[in-house]
Structures are given as C-alpha cells and as structure tokens.
Amino acid sequence: MERFFERRRVYPVSAILLSLAAFVSTLLGGLFALRFRRLLHYILSFSAGVVLGVVAFDILPELFALAHESNVDVSIGMVALVAGFLLFHAVERFILVHAAHEHGFAPHRHPTVGLTSAAALIGHSFMDGVGIGLGFQVSPSVGIAVAVAVIAHDFCDGLNTVSVMLLHGNEDPRSRLMLALDALAPIVGAASTLAFNVPPAVLVPYLGFFAGFLLFIATSDILPEAHTTDRALKFLALLALTVLGAGLTFVAVRVAG
C-alpha cells in the first residue's frame, strides 16, 4: 500500500500531460464533424463502427480481464451492460413521449435526446481519463499504454459527440459546448484519480454499464440514422465506413496493447 501511494505521487504530471493530448484529439474530432456536416451520414456510419469497436475490442476485453484478475463474477459486468442498454432505451423513450406535442407521430428530432447521448459519451471520456490516472498508479508503462489507446480513439469520441448533437437538431453553440465538456472530461478524470483508488469490484460493473450505454448509442441511435437510404450503392458505402471504423478501432487497440 505504501508503494501504491508513492507511485501516485511520482506520476501525476505524466497522467495530466497525456490527458491534455486526449483533450486536443477530442477537439479535433468534434471540429471535423462541425466543418463537414454535409457528410454527416458518412461521419455517422464511421462513428457507429468506432463505438461498436470500442465496446467489442476495448471495454469488454478489459472487463473480462479485470474480472478474472480480481476474482469478480463476470456476470455482474454483463448484468450491468444489459442494465445500461435498457436504462438508456427507457430514458430515450421517456423523453420522446414527453416531447411528443408535435403533429401526431410525424418524423421529428429531439435536441434533448442528443444531449443525453452526448452526456453518455462525456461520461465515457471522463472514465478514459480515470483509466489513464489509474494506469499510472500501477506503473508508468501501463499508464502510457492506456493513454495511447485513449488518445487514438478520442478523435472519434469528439466526432461522435458532435454527430449525435447535430443528428437530433441541436444548434452549433450547444454542440460546441458539449464538445468542450467532452474534451475536458479526460483531464478531469485523470486529475480525480489523485484523490481515490477504485476497487476492481466497482470497476467491473462500471465497465459493463457504460458498454451498455455505448452499445445502445451505436445500434439504436447512430447506426439506423446513418444507414437510411434507398440507394444500394450508397448503403454499401455507408456500411463499408462502419466496418472501417470498427476495424481501425481494433487495430488501434491491438497496437496500443
């Protein structure tokens, strides 16, 4: 335990500096989405693949490894995944029902849903920063490995945050605000680990819960909107971008690991 606190004093600067790199990466991704909004369907298709890749190749393997190393029942994490998915579904339906004062059941967009989706991504980014900080509490090599993985996909985190905001009709100022919060989240997360130590028994259900959140965002929110087209060739191009997003995430996670 004494060595743990010693490590925490020695490496906080490295954790904060690397979280600043994640901040820049997130901002660049979000600004890209704002600049090229006419290509939003293509951006969303790629984003859906990235989110699916993060869940399948990053979060779930980490959950299984952590549960095994800590002798925590992995089913706890999977129950949390289902709970996260269903909770987000229930929240979205609740918002839609109470926002349905428009013309019957005609197609419509709800900025509040975009805010909720973006808030979930901000929570994920915060825990990215927590991951960097806790990695440095273990060792500098682990901290650097985690930071590389975070920086690699934070570009797409910023892109995803802006995409879901625009998708649900939010204006530029609100989208930029959520992007700024998403970019700051890893720094706040990394800094917060200087004050606490999270036990594995808590991390396992957390990872599962946010995997469920992100899985819902990808499969029930971003992907259906991105792939709405009657043209077969365009659909194939959009599908290829989704596969590319998932594939690049797989490569980034493997290289960082």
Image (cartoon, helix red, strand yellow):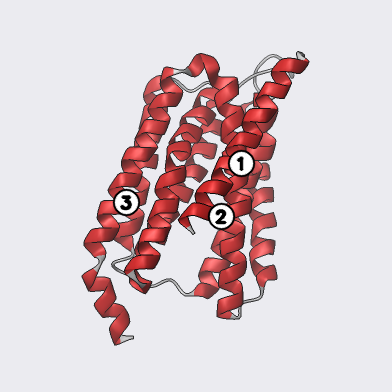
Horizontal and vertical percent position of residue 178: 40, 34
Compare residues 129 and 109 and report the one nearer the observer: 129
Q: CA distance from mark 2 to mark 1?
A: 11 Å
Is 6 rendered above or below residue 32? Answer: below
Q: Residue at 41% of width from left, 18% of height from top?
A: 35
Image quadrant in which the N terminus is located: bottom left
Of callouts 2 and 1, which one flags the residue occurring earlier in the amino acid sequence?
A: 2
The residue indicated by pointer 2 is 58
Tell me, yes or no, if residue 89 can be seen here: yes
Horizontal and vertical percent position of residue 165: 50, 28
The secondary structure type at the circle numbered 1 is helix
Q: Amino acid at mark 2?
A: Asp
Of callouts 1 and 3, which one flags the residue occurring earlier in the amino acid sequence?
A: 3
Closest to the camera, between mark 1 and mark 3, is 1
Tell me, yes or no, if residue 126 can be seen here: no
Q: Do callouts 2 and 1 mark residues in contact (Cβ within 8 Å)?
A: no
Q: Is residue 178 left or right of residue 204?
A: left
Of callouts 2 and 3, which one flags the residue occurring earlier in the amino acid sequence?
A: 3
Compare residues 223 and 188 and report the one nearer the observer: 223
The secondary structure type at the circle numbered 3 is helix
Q: CA distance from mark 2 to mark 3?
A: 18 Å
The secondary structure type at the circle numbered 2 is helix
Q: CA distance from mark 1 to mark 3?
A: 23 Å
Q: Amino acid at mark 3?
A: Ser
The residue indicated by pointer 1 is 246
Q: Amino acid at mark 1?
A: Ala
In this rendering, the count of numbered labels is 3
Q: Which mark is residue 19?
A: 3
